[in-house]
Amino acid sequence: MKLNKEEKEIRASVERGEWSITTKKSELRKYQEAARQMLKKDARLNIRISSQDLKNLQKKAMEEGLPYQTFVSSLLHKYVAGRLVEA
């Protein structure tokens, strides 16, 4: 996964030990359950697209180091969450 400058700075800061997190067990359980629900893949989607679009998606996924189905799922999730930003 490619990181932008800000993300690289945050990663370096974490690696230097500049971050610490103290969380109550009940709060931690709440976040774990929210993450579990968000990551749960319980629905199937079948679509037909052009072979050229599929090739392009697979190429982009490879550039990101992801399986193409994971990449497509990520794109859809970002879009519905309002976080898909055009370059």
Image (spheres, rainbow, N blue to C red):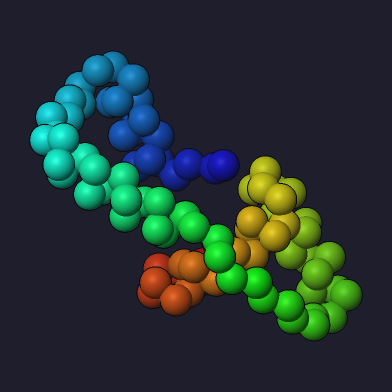
Asked whether, in this view, residue 66 is left or right of residue 11, the answer is: right
In which quadrant will I find the N terminus?
top right
Percent from the top left, x then y, of residue 18? 20, 22
Q: Which residue is painted at 44% across and 76% down in the image?
A: 80
In the current view of this chain or complex, which residue is farthest to the top? 16
Q: Residue furthest right?
A: 51
Vertical order, 70 against 25 (above or below) = below
Name the one closer to the observer, 46 or 86: 46
The answer to whether 64 appears left or right of 40 in the picture is right
Q: Residue at x 46, y 67 (%)?
A: 78
Q: Nearer the viewer, residue 29 or 75?
A: 29
Asked if residue 75 can be seen in this view, the reply is: no
Q: Is residue 83 left or right of residue 22?
A: right
Q: Indicate whether 83 appears above or below 27.
A: below
Instruction: Name the spot of residue 7 as percent of width and height, x first.
Output: 38, 40
The percent coordinates of residue 8 (x first, y second) are 40, 34
> Vertical placement of 78 versus 32: above or below?
below
Direction from residue 64 to residue 34 in the image, left or right: left
Residue at left offset 64%, top offset 65%: 72
Residue in the picture at 84% in, 80% down: 50
Question: Can see residue 6?
Answer: yes
**Eyeballing the image, is 81 above or below 50?**
above
Q: How many marks?
A: 0
